[in-house]
Image (cartoon, rainbow, N blue to C red):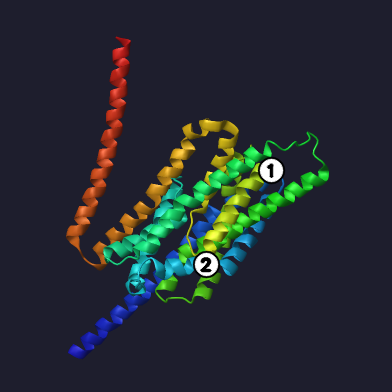
Amino acid sequence: MAKRNAAYIQHLLRDNKMLVVILSFVMAYFFAYNIGASGSAASMSVSYGSGVIKRKMIALLVCSLALFAGAIFGSGAVVKTLSKSIIPEKVITPEVVLIILISSAGTLFIANLLSIPLSTSEVTVGAIVGAGLAFQSLHAEKLLTIVFFWIAVPVSAMLVTYLLVKGGRFINIPKEVNPKWRRAGSILLILAGSLEAYAAGMNNVGNAIGPLVGAGLVPIKTGIFTGAIFMVLGVLSLGGRVIETSAKKIVKISVPNGIAISGVSGIMVTFASLYGLPIPITQVTTSAIAGVSAAKNGKEIWKQPIVFLIVRIWVVSPVLSMVTAYFLIQLCLRHNFYTTVVVLSVILATLFTASLAKTGSKQLKSDMKKREAL
């Protein structure tokens, strides 16, 4: 009887293990699909918005091909970083993988529903760090390197596009542009957008399948191939809305500026990917746009909300997924009730403090207006 009960318990454990593995794959490919749907299609927005590519489906197909090529031929280094370089491989069990993917994919999905722009790479790294903190096992040197480049690459993109636009002002461009030059500019813009999509494929597929590879649930080449397919499906099925929205927002960007923005972003993220650095490509592109705006509008750019938005995303993206992963591991795997209560208390205290500060600020402004009226 005892042997039968022991065998039954082992059977249940095997079934639960298999369920965890299946859910991990579902979350990984759901994440890849969302990555493709949410941000990758935006790489062709300038080409589509400027009319260089007139049909939206053509723009999405070009983006998909470049994205897929980048994932297949250049994502290996980033996948290795996200699979074993931030936390030790011994920590990455199927259960931990599932929590990392729930924290990163879930955070990104909710943010997309609320129209809050979070960085895919930062969300993933944050979730992995949360797991490392929960088990008190973290490769701090590699993490600090990644964080440094999170800041350095977008700032460099802003500086380069600023200098390119400033330098371009000294070149005399005739009012009537030769059709051959116009055609060349259109081709360069499409190539620059394709490079940006290629870089997105290199850098982003690892966010979805890196944890699976780290736990030994899938071979790296198989993981990259299948993850790339789901990213492409995301682009083709839901990318149309993203490209339409982005095109309307950046329609005022000229073809030369579009080449500078997409070209600089694509080149920088490509080089970062070759060194295995998961870089937030959306922030790099946004910073490149800010550099163009700074060259045109001078100091006024620093008064624009976009600058503060970039800073907030830098901070919020990794912290949110890190806290989520840490909380879930403490609650579900370590059964540490006391730590869970402390984490929840800190979150609630932070939210209430922010709410009180906002209310107090409004009340202060209201009191000042009343005094001025008197």
Pointer 2 local density, CA inside 10 Å: few below 14, some 14–19, many at least 20: many
Amino acid type at image mark 2: Gly
Up-down relation of residue 370 to residue 300 (above or below): above
Instruction: Write the residue at 29% across / 62% down.
Output: 133
Q: Can residue 193 be seen in this view?
A: yes
Indicate whether 364 appears above or below 192: above
226 relative to 142 in the view: left or right = right
Depth check: 42 or 29 in front? 42
Name the element at disc 1.
helix
Classify 283 as above or below 174: below
Locate residue 290, reporting x and y percent.
54, 40
**Nearer-N-terminus badge (2/1):** 2
Q: Residue at x 21, y 49 (%)?
A: 345
Q: Do the residues labelled 2 and 1 touch (CB within 8 Å)?
A: no
Quadrant of image for the C terminus: top left
Which residue does the numbered mark 1 point to in the structure image? 255
Callout 1 amino acid: Val
Q: Where is residue 59 in the image (x, y as percent from the top left)?
A: 66, 53
Question: Which picture quadrant has residue 252?
Answer: top right
Can you identify the residue that label 2 sits on?
Answer: 227
The spot of residue 215 in percent (x, y) is 39, 74
| Residue at mark 2 to residue at mark 1: CA–CA distance | 32 Å
Q: Could you say whether the residue bearing mark 2 is in a helix, strand or loop?
A: helix
Q: Where is residue 268 in the image (x, y as percent from the top left)?
A: 56, 55
Dot 1 alpha-carbon crowd within 10 angstroms: few under 14, some 14 to 19, many 20 or more: many
Q: Nearer the viewer, mark 2 or mark 1?
A: 1
Report if residue 1 is visible in the image: no
Name the residue at 34% across, 73% down.
93
Q: Which residue is drawn at 39% across and 54% down?
A: 107
